[in-house]
Image: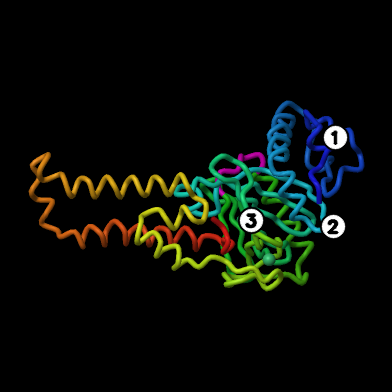
Amino acid sequence: MSISSVVRRASRFQDLLAIPGGDGPYVFTRMFREGNGRERRRSRRHFKLLKRVDGTLRELVQPNEKVVFLTRAWGLSFWEQWVLGWRRAVVLTDCRAIFLQLDAGRRPAFLHRQVAYGAIATASGGRRGEVQVGTRGGDKLKLRGIRRVDRVAVVERLRNAAKANRGAQAALETETLCPYCHKGLSGRPRSCPSCLKDFRKGWLSALSSLLIPGLGDYRVGYRAFAVLELLTAVAIWAAYLVGPGVWGMPGLHVLGPEWVFTAVHGGDAVLTWRVVRSGIFLSGMA
Ligand SMILES: [Zn+2]
């Protein structure tokens, strides 16, 4: 599906509201509201987000699927939010919620997730301002960082959609979308059952990072993070090797170099393994 020229040309959300039938998958009259000042500000935020994710979203949605709401959340986990710096665009369609990965520069990346409305057992607002979603398969999802006004809307829409889709044929838990063909994947398969592409193995990336800290992360695309890991490792090695001579810290050599290797390289390998396990990566990625 091509990028929407309607969305690209629009400079304000009001331009889209003027198209009564919507465009492609978008039902603009449900996505934006020209009400009071607060609703307009909210619509402006959603419009900016739509501009960023339009191309990606159009590739993902099915031919008859309709997009009715979108907003932004922090990452879906501690790792996404704090280690990798990801955010998520939360997109509600008429049959599922899609969580688009936004990279540290807030651009759409490739690790998207979804939950079908038929899979949702509970949706509620948590005490710390998060949206909690429970699936019939036992998954628990916490969407943090959604603005309050959008949070209320998300909880209400998920609840209503879950009720309306009870008993519908759907996967019972959240699924990762294949980065290549965008079909939902249950668990962490080694390859995509639909397009047969292989995914990168977590242990292989961990091994790369064991040899050179950061290498495993670099190879799956987290370059800034990888450089940070490498610099940290170099700094620790430098302190260990020259510290006693330069700063007179003989205590450093109580531990042999194999201990430093285990702590620094081993620790980084575990970190890389966690990062790669947090998503599915195509094997051929640089
Ligand atoms: Zn696939």
Query: Which of the two discs, 1 and 3, sits closer to the camera?
Result: 3
Q: Nearer the viewer, residue 263 or 83?
A: 263
Q: Which residue is mark 2?
A: 63
Q: Which residue is mark 3?
A: 112
| Label 3 SS | loop
- Residue 178 % position (x, y): 66, 63
Drawn side of residue 104 relative to residue 39, left or right: left
Q: Is residue 10 above or below residue 167?
A: above
Q: Which residue is mark 1?
A: 17
Q: Quadrant of ligand 1?
A: bottom right
Disc 3 crowd rating (10 Å Cα; few below 14, some 14-19, many 20+) is many
- Residue 79 % position (x, y): 47, 53
Quadrant position of residue 210: bottom left
Tell me which residue sits at (53%, 65%) in the image.
Answer: 200
| Label 2 SS | loop
Question: Tag 2: residue type?
Answer: Pro
Drawn side of residue 230 relative to residue 129, left or right: left
Disc 1 crowd rating (10 Å Cα; few below 14, some 14-19, many 20+) is some
Question: Tag 3: residue type?
Answer: His
Q: Earlier in the sequence, mark 1 or mark 2?
A: 1
Question: Tag 1: residue type?
Answer: Leu
Q: Is 149 part of what is drawn in magenta?
A: yes
Rendered-image quadrant of the C terminus: bottom right
What span is colored magenta in the figure? 144-150
